[in-house]
Amino acid sequence: MNNELTRQDIQKMQEELDYRRLTLMPELIEEVKRTRAFGDLSENFEYKAAKQAQNKNRSRIRYLEGMIKSARIIDDRSAADQVGLFDKVEVYLPEDDETEIIQVVSTVRCDPRKGLISRESPFGKQVLGKRVGDRFTVQVNERYSYEAEIRSITKTKDDGSAPLMQY
């Protein structure tokens, strides 16, 4: 399975991987050594906690390595006036009579509570490529769908910062 990631996603993962390998792992190894000296390992909670932290770090390292290794790099190819990856979009939802600001991001960065919507979600798939004034229907499942309208688009860099242009 290929993970669709941006260059920025891979860079952030590589930075975390380097930190975990070069800084955190030596610290955890030292903590395991230190707590091992406390005595009987069968009743040594500190040693067990240190080993768990070390194993959790190793697991995260393997996960990051796998994500980077299997990554397929994606770029935003939207036109200047279309919704693209990482653009901030003001969306009007007539059903609720409210407006929301969302940002369509790669799957590894999504956090719906912060308005970061995955490009793989039903909403993300529908909003990409739309222009200001476009209305569209989001089909959530067989029974539920809702309407939305693009009110404005703010083009941003691929890290979601620094507005470049607004429509």
Image (spheres, helix red, strand yellow):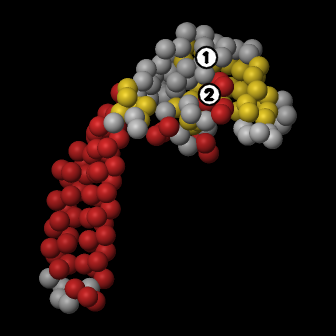
Residue 138 in the image, given as x and y percentages of width and height: 73, 30
- Would residue 21 be visible to someone looking at this image? yes
Name the residue rendered at 31%, 44% in the picture. 66
Q: Residue tagged by mark 2?
A: 125
Name the residue rendered at 84%, 30% in the picture. 94
Q: Is mark 1 on a helix, strand or loop?
A: loop
Judged from this view, the residue extending furthest toward the top is: 80
Name the residue rendered at 27%, 58% in the picture. 58
* Quadrant location, the N terminus: top left
Q: What element carries label 2?
A: helix
Residue 60 in the image, given as x and y percentages of width and height: 33, 53
Q: Which image quadrant is residue 141 in?
A: top right
> In the image, is residue 19 above or below residue 117?
below
Name the residue rendered at 50%, 21% in the picture. 156
Q: Residue tagged by mark 1?
A: 129
- Would residue 98 be visible to someone looking at this image? no
Q: Which image quadrant is residue 127 in?
A: top right
Residue 146 in the image, given as x and y percentages of width and height: 79, 33
